[in-house]
C-alpha cells in the first residue's frame, strides 16, 4: 500500500499535468522574456516581443476602452484586399517562432522577403526567404548601433543567447538597409540563431514609417485615425505587406478576449470593454483588409499574418478591428523599399 508521501507526490504530479494541459500550449507556443528599456511608447518605435505570461507590461493603463466602437459601425468604402490574391506565392507563409520572443525578426524578414519577391524581377530574388534566425543572431550578438549606425562589434558564431529579449522595429529594418539579410538556402543552420558573418547580404533601399500619426499625437481625432488607415491600405496595395505591432491582451478570466485563444472572427468586434491585462507588444504583418457581418452590422478589419504557427487563429492568420488603432495596430507601422 502506498505511503502518505507517495500519495501526495502522485496528487502533485496529476495537478501539474492538468495545469500543463490547460496552459502549457500557450507557454510553449510563445514564450520569451520581458523587455524593459528606457524607451517607451512615446519613442519613435514600440518594442515588440513575446513573453511567458507571468507578469504585466508597463503600459497597462494606456489600454482603457478607447478602442471600442461606441458610435455604431462605420461603412466600409473600400474593396477588400488580400496580398495573396494579388501576388500569389510571392507572399511568405506562416512561420512559428516557438517559445522565443523573436517576433520582431519574423515580422521584419517576412515583409522584407515579400517585398524582395514583389519588387525585384531577377531570378535571384524570385524565391528568396530571408532568414529570421540568422538576422536575429546577427542583430543581437554580432552587431550594435554606434552613433546611429549599425556596425559589427563581435565575431560571435554560436547560437545567440539574447535573441528572445525583444527589439524595436525601426532599428531592425534599418539593419536590413545598412547590413542586409541572408536567404535560408545560403546558410547551413537554417533554424539556429547564429550569425553567418557572410558579406554582401541582400539589402533594402530604405526604411520608412507608414503611420502618419503615432500613439502620442493620434488622440481621439477621427481624421487622424482615417489618415493612418488610408496610408496603410495604400502602402500594402502598392508595395506589399507591412510590419506592425499589437498589444497582446491576456485576461485570465475572459477567454473570448484573450488573444492567445483567438480562433476566428474579427478580434475586438462587438466587445463591451477592453481588458487591462496584457503581455506586452508583439510584431506581426498586415497583409490586407476587408469587412464582415458581426452582430447584424458590417465590421471593418485588417487581415494579419502571425508567427505562431498555423494552429493559432485562422491557419496562422487573424482579423482585427480596422480604423480604430485597436491594440495599437495602426500607430507603429513600418515598411522597406526593396525596389
Image: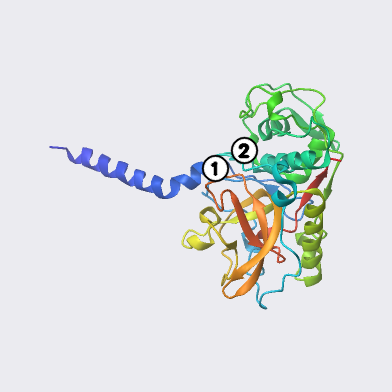
What residue is rendered at 62% in x and 75% in y? 297
Which mark is first along the chain, 2 or 1?
1
> Alpha-carbon distance for marks 1 and 2?
9 Å
Residue 335: image location, x then y, percent: 79, 47
Few, some or many C-alpha atoms within 10 Å of disc 2 (few <14, some 14-19, many ≥20)?
many
Q: Which disc number belongs to residue 3?
A: none
Snapshot quadrant of residue 49: top right
| Viewer-closest of 291 and 132 | 291
What residue is rendered at 66% in x and 26% in y? 194
| Residue wearing tag 2 | 164
Please tell me whether mark 2 sits on a helix, a strand or a loop. helix
Q: Do callouts 1 and 2 mark residues in contact (Cβ within 8 Å)?
A: yes
What residue is rendered at 76% in x and 34% in y? 126
The quarter of the image holding the N terminus is: top left
Residue 201: image location, x then y, percent: 80, 28
Q: Is residue 123 visible in this depiction of the protein?
A: yes
Q: Is residue 153 left or right of residue 48?
A: right
Snapshot quadrant of residue 71: bottom right
| Viewer-closest of 251 and 113 | 113
- Determine whether 72 is above or below 217 in the image: below
Q: Is residue 68 visible in this depiction of the protein?
A: no
Q: Which disc number belongs to residue 31?
A: 1
The quarter of the image holding the C terminus is: top right
Amino acid at each position: 500500500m502506498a505511503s502518505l508521501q507517495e500519495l501526495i507526490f502522485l496528487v502533485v504530479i496529476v495537478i501539474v499535468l492538468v495545469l500543463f494541459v490547460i496552459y502549457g500550449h500557450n507557454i510553449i507556443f510563445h514564450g520569451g522574456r520581458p523587455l524593459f528599456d528606457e524607451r517607451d511608447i512615446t519613442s519613435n518605435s514600440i518594442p515588440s516581443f513575446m513573453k511567458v505570461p507571468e507578469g504585466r507590461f508597463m503600459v497597462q493603463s494606456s489600454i482603457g476602452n478607447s478602442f471600442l466602437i461606441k458610435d455604431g459601425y462605420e461603412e466600409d468604402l473600400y474593396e477588400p484586399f488580400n496580398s495573396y490574391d494579388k501576388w500569389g506565392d510571392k507572399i511568405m507563409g506562416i512561420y512559428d517562432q516557438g517559445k522565443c520572443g523573436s517576433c520582431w525578426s519574423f515580422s521584419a524578414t517576412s515583409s522584407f522577403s515579400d517585398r524582395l519577391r514583389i519588387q525585384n524581377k531577377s531570378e535571384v530574388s524570385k524565391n528568396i526567404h530571408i532568414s529570421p534566425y540568422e538576422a536575429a543572431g546577427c542583430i543581437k550578438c554580432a552587431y550594435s548601433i554606434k552613433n546611429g549606425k549599425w556596425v559589427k562589434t563581435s565575431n560571435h558564431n554560436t547560437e545567440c543567447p539574447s535573441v528572445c529579449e525583444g527589439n524595436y522595429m525601426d532599428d531592425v529594418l534599418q539593419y536590413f538597409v545598412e547590413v542586409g539579410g541572408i536567404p535560408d538556402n545560403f546558410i547551413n543552420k537554417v533554424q539556429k540563431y547564429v550569425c553567418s558573418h557572410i558579406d554582401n547580404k541582400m539589402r533594402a533601399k530604405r526604411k520608412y514609417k507608414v503611420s502618419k500619426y503615432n500613439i502620442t499625437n493620434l488622440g481621439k481625432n477621427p481624421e487622424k485615425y482615417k489618415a493612418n488607415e488610408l496610408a496603410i491600405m495604400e502602402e500594402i496595395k502598392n508595395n506589399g505587406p507591412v510590419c506592425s505591432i499589437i498589444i497582446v491582451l491576456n485576461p485570465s478570466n475572459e477567454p473570448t478576449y484573450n488573444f492567445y485563444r483567438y480562433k476566428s472572427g474579427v478580434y475586438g468586434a462587438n466587445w463591451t470593454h477592453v481588458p487591462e491585462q496584457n503581455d506586452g507588444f508583439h510584431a506581426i504583418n498586415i497583409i490586407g483588409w476587408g469587412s464582415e457581418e458581426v452582430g447584424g452590422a458590417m465590421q471593418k478589419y485588417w487581415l494579419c499574418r502571425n508567427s505562431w504557427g498555423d494552429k493559432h487563429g485562422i491557419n496562422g492568420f487573424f482579423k482585427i478591428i480596422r480604423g480604430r488603432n485597436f491594440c495599437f495596430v495602426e500607430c507603429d507601422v513600418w515598411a522597406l523599399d526593396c525596389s
